[in-house]
Image (cartoon, helix red, strand yellow):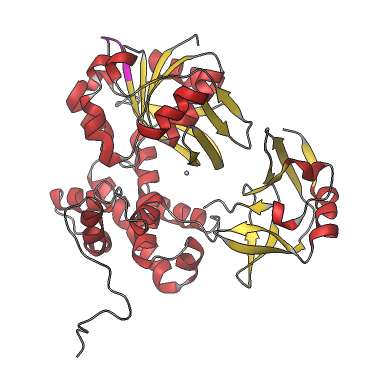
Amino acid sequence: MEKVNLKEKLGLITEHWHPGIVGRVNDTDVKLAKLQGEFDWHHHADEDELFLVLEGRLLMRFRERDVWLEPGEMLVVPKGVEHKPVAPEEAHILLVEPAGTLNTGTVETELGGYFGARLAASGQDVRFVARGAHLAAMRETGLRVSSPKGAVTVSPVQASDDPAEVGPVDVVLVAVKTWQLAQVVEGLPPLLEADSVVLPLLNGVEAADELAAAVGKGRVLKGLCRIISMVEAPGHIRHLGAEPSIVLGEWDNERTARVTGLRDVLAGAGIHARVPGDIDVALWEKFAFVVSVGGVGAVTRAPIGQERSHPATRAMIESAIREIVTVGQASGVKIGEDVVEKSMSFVDTLPAQGSASLQRDLAAGRPSELEAWNGAVVRIGRQLGLETPIHAFIHASLVLLEERARGRREFDTPGVEADPCLER
């Protein structure tokens, strides 16, 4: 993407906007406060918007507090800002809180939509298993991805809610929530031939075992992905941030032809793909970070900037990461003690208003990945004779909300006027 001088571009913006409102964050007005230093940004214009990915820091005003947009966060404004002043009400800011031709099937959320669209755009034969409004939109208008790495639309799309209509395929990318995996497993047989490969891209550390139990260990690779994305609307995936990447490997870490071949296919589609020296270490390192930050965020109901800035909650995140490292080591994974420090350093780079999917799902009353995240830490720890008090507390604090979201319990959340008051 072309590099553009930030001062030249934002000079135009500040001339017409400062000190007016330049955008919205979580339905709140955001004001441009000032610029700091010399910066460049990358930009990519799709048909509707201009995406600007900061390489320097930009100071914004948010709810009467200074908030830094950090490198890699995105300013999203109408395309016209390149050529003419844009009225403040027309702009918005997004703070980012995510070898040949293969016949590839994706069982998907927005993750599968993004990676599948990139593969299809590179010439791969990709078929999607989707449902509901998302499937209907894909059939009618195709699959659209908006991204700072370039927009892409796949049309027509090969998509169905019936795996039998899709398969068999060479590779199945499983990119669903962990609690949806059991349903996915039921639909896998029609997708598989003798040499088909299943690559799970789920959060957690147990998906590969669950898939292996269903379809055979020899058909399953281990994997994870990193991307910040969302379903903007049915049939429309928006990539919000982070370099989209996939990490994959064999159970014994052998660099087989199927692993390196799939890595090359992904790389050919513009997806950063890597085969690590130890796939289990990679899985547990991500697990330690995501589960700890997500769990503490769900309990505190605060954004990451608040969690990391208060001594008590910062210590809670750090202790939660350390518990997972201990459980991983006891499970035979060669995860190092330095993961705690590295994870906390990464926490400090995250957008202050960011949050994890676990926190957002529970706050919205949706089923979450609680059992595969904090619940799994507690369960695996107990199997190994280890206590994990931080994760046990998080799980116990959230399990009623999880069961309500799944329809197993019914109750209203008490408000300030709730009666009877227990302290009477």
Residue shown at the point (49%, 39%) measured from the top left: 233
Q: Is residue 203 left or right of residue 17?
A: left
Where residue 72 appears, as percent x and y from the top left, is: 62, 47
Q: Which one is nearer the viewer's eye here, 59 or 47?
A: 47
User: Which picture quadrant has residue 418?
Assistant: bottom left
Where residue 400 appears, as percent x and y from the top left, is: 21, 61
Say which quadrant the N terminus sits in.
top right
Residue shown at the point (37%, 67%) measured from the top left: 300
Query: Can I make out residue 332 in this image?
Result: yes
User: Which picture quadrant has residue 261?
Assistant: top left
Say which quadrant the C terminus sits in.
bottom left
Q: Is residue 202 left or right of residue 389?
A: right
Q: Which one is nearer the viewer's eye here, 29 or 174?
A: 29
Query: Can I make out residue 264 in this image?
Result: no
In magenta stretch: residue 315: no
Farthest residue toward the bottom?
Answer: 424
In magenta stretch: residue 195: yes
Taking 423 as reference, is 365 above or below it? Answer: above
Please report the bounds of the magenta region as a residue range: 193-197
Residue shown at the point (35%, 25%) measured from the top left: 199
Taking 9 as reference, is 398 above or below it? Answer: below
Where residue 305 appears, as percent x and y from the top left, is: 51, 64
Where residue 274 appears, as percent x and y from the top left, is: 48, 28
Q: Is residue 357 left or right of residue 393?
A: right
Per the picture, the main secondary structure of the magenta-coloured stretch is loop
Q: Which one is nearer the viewer's eye here, 304 or 83?
A: 83
Taking 48 as reference, is 194 above or below it? Answer: above
Q: How many marks?
A: 0
